[in-house]
Each structure stands twice: as C-alpha cells, then as structure tokens.
Image (cartoon, helix red, strand yellow):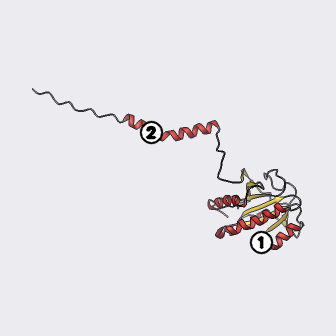
Amino acid sequence: MTLPEEVPRKASGLPTLALVVSLLALPFIIAAGLYFVGWRSERTANHGRFVNPPVPLPAGGLKTTDGRPLATTELQGKWLLLLSGKGSCDPDCVRRIDEMRRIQVSLDKQMGRVRRVVVTDRIADVELAAALQWQPDLVLAEAPANWLPGSGNDSGYQLHIIDSQGNLIMNYPSEVAAKGVRSDLVRLLKFSWGG
C-alpha cells in the first residue's frame, strides 16, 4: 500500500493583500493627519491674495467722468482688472494702469473677456485724465471712500481681480509684478465658465 503524496499547501494571499491596501491608504492617512494638525503649504500657485469668501461689489456709488451714475451691473459680464485708490495718481499708479493694458493685450484671444477699471476719489486727477486719453477703453469712475469692501488696508492704489459676476476675488499689493497678475488671470479665465 502506497501512501498518498502530500499536496503542497497554497500560500495565503492575505499578507500581500494587506500590504497593497496599506500602501494605497497611506497617502490618505498622511493627508488627513496634516489636515487635522493644521499644516498649510507656505507656497501657493497664485501671486495675489484670495478674498475668501468673495465680496460682491456695492450696487451703486460710482460716477463716470461726466458725473453720470455708473451702476455696478454695467461692469458685470466681464472679468475686471480694477485699480482702486485714494488721492493723486502717483508714478506707481500710472505704472499699474499701463500694466493693466499690457496684461489685457497679452491675453490675445481672451482679451475680450477682460475690462480695465480705475476707481478713485479724485476723478479729475491730471495723470488719470492723461491715462484715459491714451487708453479710451479704460473705465474711470469716482467712488466714495471705502467703496470696495474687502480690498485690504494698503495705502495708495491697489490692483484687484473681479469675476464676471461682480465679486472681488483677489487683491494684489504693489510689489506683485504684472507677470504674476497675468499668470493668475490666465488660470482664472481658463477654469471659468462665464464671462
């Protein structure tokens, strides 16, 4: 009588399965840990400061150069590069107005989606009048003090991006270069459904 041959035992796949599942779950566990600890990346892709939550523009309060009221709804439908400030338009203000034009022109096929606006308390300023003369498509409007809520407390003229629904979404301090503003605007236009 011969003894039956021993059948080799199959290795259990359980340890392999556990290893694969733990490797797949590891990134989620690390991300959850970082989230609950409160860690945030020091570097972000945007160059401006996001306004969170976005702040809607006031419905009124603006006046055109000829004294006519300018409703905010007339500015909606396009993205706005909006320069706001108080007092005389200094050389930095003049530089920003020129940068706004160059940013818009550099958008090429997308330039029709953007409008440039300057909001000031001194609409009769000589530099602003000159800018309006050599940039006739620039919108120049007079506004009361603190017309733009959520715009920050920086002195001088500050650049902002307003979405096509009329919400302030980004602020730019004067040290941010035009290249950074353009980069942010291109990204916003790329992922925007409207305007």
Crowding at mark 1 (Cα within 10 Å: few <14, some 14-19, many 20+): few
Residue 170's place in the image compared with 25, above or below, is below
Would residue 61 appear left or right of 45 to someone viewing this image? right
The residue positioned 64% from the left and 52% from the top of the image is: 45
Q: What residue is shown with label 1?
A: 137
Numbered disc total: 2
Q: Quadrant of residue 13?
A: top left
Q: Nearer the viewer, residue 157 or 18?
A: 157
What element does badge 2 sit on?
helix
Which amino acid does the dot numbered 1 rest on?
Asp
Which amino acid does the dot numbered 2 rest on?
Val
Q: What residue is shown with label 2?
A: 21
Q: Of all residues shown, which one is farthest toward the left?
A: 1
Image x and y of residue 159, in percent: 77, 58
Would residue 105 appear left or right of 34 to someone viewing this image? right
Of the residues under marks 1 and 2, which one precedes in the sequence?
Answer: 2
Would residue 193 appear left or right of 125 to someone viewing this image? left
Q: Quadrant of residue 144?
A: bottom right
Crowding at mark 2 (Cα within 10 Å: few <14, some 14-19, many 20+): few
Image x and y of residue 185, in percent: 68, 60
**Quarter of the picture holding the C terminus:** bottom right
Q: Quadrant of residue 130?
A: bottom right
Residue 135's place in the image compared with 158, above or below, is below
What element does badge 1 sit on?
loop
Image x and y of residue 116, in percent: 76, 66
**Quarter of the picture holding the N terminus:** top left
The residue positioned 78% from the left and 57% from the top of the image is: 57
Would residue 173 appear left or right of 2 to someone viewing this image? right
Q: CA distance from mark 1 to mark 2?
A: 60 Å
The residue positioned 79% from the left and 65% from the top of the image is: 97
